[in-house]
Image (cartoon, rainbow, N blue to C red):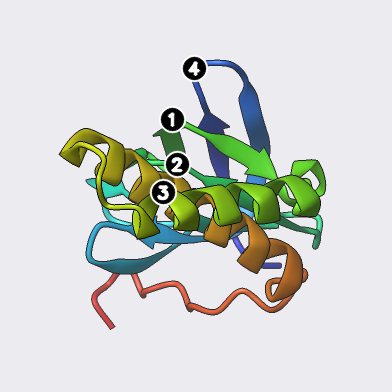
Amino acid sequence: MEKSFHVEFITPDKSVFEGEATSVVLQAEGGSLGIRAGHAPMVATLEVGAARVDTADGEQVVMMIGDGFLEVRDNQVKVLAELGELRDEIDLARAEEAERRALARLKDRAGAEVDFNRAKASLTRAMTRIKILRDLAPGRLQGKPRDPRGG
């Protein structure tokens, strides 16, 4: 049996997921990051993206996470993120509407720089939600965990 470790995904509003996992794959600043039991201690900055948890009981949990931080220490992974939504909580129609609104705001560049940056961030979140629902059915999230021994 594959070794497991404890995982927590937490937002300011709720605990999105907590349990035992055999691997976690998520979007860190600079690229995809994979974690397995025995991973070296680390802290990383996370970007908006899809995250996958392969649970110790063989299930797969897919979610969208917002910007945040990751801590790996003592066979525990803690993710603190601005946003966190399980795949089943994402509303496709709402995400598509958010994508349309963000694209319209980006097309109309007459607004302030702050509005442009907010529209860009909104577009990224909407596109991530849509990708999770359309392309990342359980078992299809790409990215393989790195070997903690550097392999």
User: In the figure, 50 relative to 76: above or below?
Assistant: below
The reply to whether dot 3 and dot 1 touch (C-beta < 8 Å) is: no
Circle 2 sits on which residue? 66
Q: In terms of sequence position, does the residue under pointer 2 or pointer 4 come before the other? A: 4
Name the residue rendered at 57%, 16% in the picture.
13
Q: In terms of sequence position, does the residue under pointer 3 or pointer 2 come before the other? A: 2
Mark toward the viewer: 3 or 2 = 3
Q: In terms of sequence position, does the residue under pointer 1 or pointer 2 come before the other? A: 2
> Disc 3 versus disc 2: distance between alpha carbons?
21 Å
Secondary structure found at label 3: helix
Amino acid at the residue labelled 2: Gly
> Disc 2 versus disc 4: distance between alpha carbons?
11 Å
Secondary structure found at label 2: loop
The reply to whether dot 3 and dot 4 touch (C-beta < 8 Å) is: no
The reply to whether dot 1 and dot 2 touch (C-beta < 8 Å) is: yes
> Disc 1 versus disc 4: distance between alpha carbons?
7 Å
User: In the figure, 69 relative to 22: above or below?
Assistant: above
Q: Quadrant of residue 89?
A: top right
